Amino acid sequence: MNKAPLLLAIVVSAFSASAQAQTETTHSFIAFGQKTYMVDASGKKTWTYPSATRDGYVLDDGTMILTLNRSKKKYPGGAVVKITPDGKESLIYKGTQAEVNSAHPTTEGNYVVTEAGDKPRLLEINEDGEILVEFPLDCQTKNHHLETRMARKLDDGTYLAPNLLDFAVVHYDKDGTVLKKFDTTVEGGPHRKIHTWPFTAIRTDNGHTLVTCTNGNRVVESDADGKVVWTLTDMDLPG
């Protein structure tokens, strides 16, 4: 008996089931940037916000935490606001320098905020805006806009902060001590390097660090020693 047609049928059947499962898997998302909006699983835009944003979260109860771009009148140094499911907006933090770049909600109900300016800093604040943790960020200060982006608090109470023009993600202890720096500069050819600007850094369950890098158009995964073990670039993706 020729087993090839049977094997082919099994492969085609499995592929069809996989394709069907993929088409049935949908989800909503929220986008931040010059335009801030939410799209449902069908692709329909269901909500918009009138201001540009830099970071944001939708909590389990539907509350949104938005990091707002600076504005000339209302928030010249940027801000962090909370919007409840019924649309009520309240201020969590008003920036005091050039701009606010992130506000990561923690499991304790606080927020990790990064602030850019002549004295770039990381803050952890509570719901009332009271500062619980504060320390300076170890980054360049000539370009405020490219100092840092989306800092995140880890389960052990330490912090990861990506510093764009320093081409590094910095791991800080609770008191601001630098524990490690992950270099995001990668080889781009025989005689040049691509200066990849780290934008977001996330610690994975296996202790690795996943970093999205703008400018270099890539995502890199580093092990605990900082060695890159996986990379995804624009060239790896169709279209």
Image (cartoon, rainbow, N blue to C red):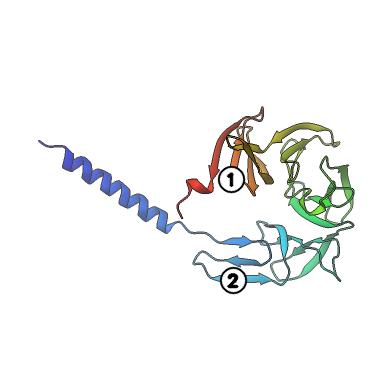
Q: Badge 1 local density, few (<14 within 10 Å), some, or many (20+)?
A: some
Q: Residue flagged by tag 2: what amino acid is it?
A: Thr
The percent position of residue 29, horizontal first and vertical second, equals: 58, 60
- In the image, residue 25 above or below residue 90: above
| Image quadrant in which you'd find residue 25 | bottom left
> Farthest front residue?
191
Where, quadrant-wise, is the N terminus in this rendering? top left
Front of the two marks 2 and 1: 1
Q: Position of residue 136 (x, y in %)?
A: 87, 42
Q: Nearer the viewer, residue 43 or 161?
A: 161
Give the vertical position of 71 relative to 171 (above or below): below
Q: Is residue 204 visible?
A: no
Secondary-structure class at tag 1: strand
Q: Is residue 149 visible?
A: yes
SS at badge 2:
strand
Q: Position of residue 198 (x, y in %)?
A: 68, 45
Residue 108 percent coordinates (x, y): 77, 46
Residue in view at x 36 percent, y 53 percent: 19
CA–CA distance in space, label 2 to label 1: 30 Å
Circles 2 and 1, Cβ within 8 Å, touching? The answer is: no
Residue position marked by numbered label 2 in the rendering: 46
Mark with earlier residue (2, 1): 2
Q: Amino acid at mark 1?
A: Arg
Residue tagged 1:
218
Local crowd size for mark 2, using a 10 Å CA cut-off: few (<14), some (14–19), many (≥20): few
Give the residue furthest to the left: 1
Residue farthest to the top?
225
The reply, left or right, for residue 20 in relation to residue 226 is: left
Q: Which mark is residue 226?
A: none
